[in-house]
Amino acid sequence: MLTGGGTGGHVYPALSVAEQLRDDQSVEAILYCGAAGHIEERLTAERNLAFVGLSVSGMPRKISGKMLTWPFQFGQAVADSIKLLKEFHPTAVLGTGGYASAPPLVAALFLKIPFAIHEPDAHPGLVNRLMGPHAGLISLGMEGGKSGFQDSIARVRVNGNPISERFLTRTSRAKAAKLLDLDPGQTTVLITGGSQGALVLNKAVYAALPALLKGPKPIQVLHQVGEKNWQDMESTVPEELRKHPLYKPRPYFENLALAYAACDLAVCRAGAMTIAELSVMGTPAIFVPLPTAAQDHQTFNAQAVADRGGAELLKQKDLTGESLSKLIQSMLQDRDGLVKMAEAMKSTAQPNAAKRLSEQLKALSAGEAISE
């Protein structure tokens, strides 16, 4: 059984593990358990993966009426998970974080079913910190995550973050540019705030467009705006910029691997999965961490990569059209520096993370020693 949810960063690692396990004839069945009506339900349906949804929400962090009702909701979700585990009889459970993973993991602990957790970020989340001491395996996406599990270090394995196979088969820059209707000979920056877009980042991009598109050395801008922000883009960006041949806005990328392959530099948030994908692709980046992310974990993620020389960190409080355009221009003009950054980014990659974690889960399931 796989469980985790709330954000794509918690769901995608589990889906990549499922991708590996589906091809393994020794695995009889896979079930995903998450929060009903949330991103995990949609993504599992797209992959024809069996899903059961729980009525569960995150623990309230502010004083409100929810503080009175939440314990009862959580208790019911644990009871439902116990019933589900008894019906499905999993030999192991993997939790990839987020509040949706808590009830199934508590149920597995109650029923003495072996379970593992995977922590994608450099700063471990609450559920994983609480369940780590009871887990048979603690898988980490980043080395920095060790700090949250010092008392359980013998069961820690730094696997990297499992990513989809599509990121492991690199498309040539020229082919990717053609598929995305880009000029392959033009220096290109990809800007994305994630699948939903990021309005704060978008507004800085709109302010930066004149300098990027019309500067002494024009830059092609491939911009994932986000479907919910598309109308704002159309009403905010002047027509001469919106229809400029070097500005390529998109609501959403069905295949983000193509966008990474087509660009020289990426500007994005610092979610763990974004970093894992960029690392495998060897794409240098400017990270603008989301300051409201739990425990500011995106800043920890970004700093870990910046310290290795693979990225620059631009804090949201310092983000303006001018600061963004100047940083993009200076990085793209330093071709030798970009090559070194690409190499540094690539050095952080863990392309076999999904396969490694899948093998470890099978060992946990069979009661065998778990490989390093």
Image (cartoon, rainbow, N blue to C red):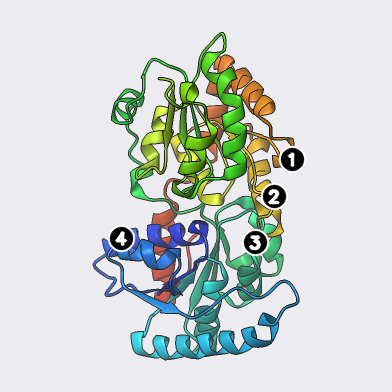
Question: Contact, CB < 8 Å: mark 2 with mark 4?
Answer: no
Q: Disc 2 and disc 4: Cα gap in Å?
A: 31 Å
Which residue lies under the disc numbered 3? 124
Quarter of the image where one finds residue 106: bottom right
Q: Disc 2 and disc 3: Cα gap in Å?
A: 16 Å
Q: Dot 1: within a 10 Å radius of its alpha carbon, few (fewer than 14), some, or many (20 or more) residues?
A: few
Q: Nearer the viewer, mark 4 or mark 1?
A: 1
Q: In this view of the protein, can residue 136 be seen by the observer? A: no
Residue at image x 40%, y 20%? 245
Question: Contact, CB < 8 Å: mark 4 with mark 3?
Answer: no
| Image x and y of residue 189, in percent | 50, 27
Q: Dot 2: within a 10 Å radius of its alpha carbon, few (fewer than 14), some, or many (20 or more) residues?
A: some
Which residue lies under the disc numbered 1? 317
Question: Contact, CB < 8 Å: mark 2 with mark 1?
Answer: yes
Q: Which of marks 2 and 3 is in front?
A: 2
Residue at image x 68%, y 37%? 307
Q: Which numbered marker is on residue 46?
A: 4
Q: Earlier in the sequence, mark 4 or mark 1?
A: 4
- Residue 71 or 168: which is nearer the viewer? 71
Q: Disc 2 and disc 1: Cα gap in Å?
A: 9 Å
Q: Which numbered marker is on residue 291?
A: 2
Looking at the rendered structure, the secondary structure element under dot 2 is: loop
Q: Disc 4 and disc 3: Cα gap in Å?
A: 28 Å
Q: Dot 4: within a 10 Å radius of its alpha carbon, few (fewer than 14), some, or many (20 or more) residues?
A: few
Looking at the rendered structure, the secondary structure element under dot 1 is: helix
| Image x and y of residue 103, in percent | 53, 81
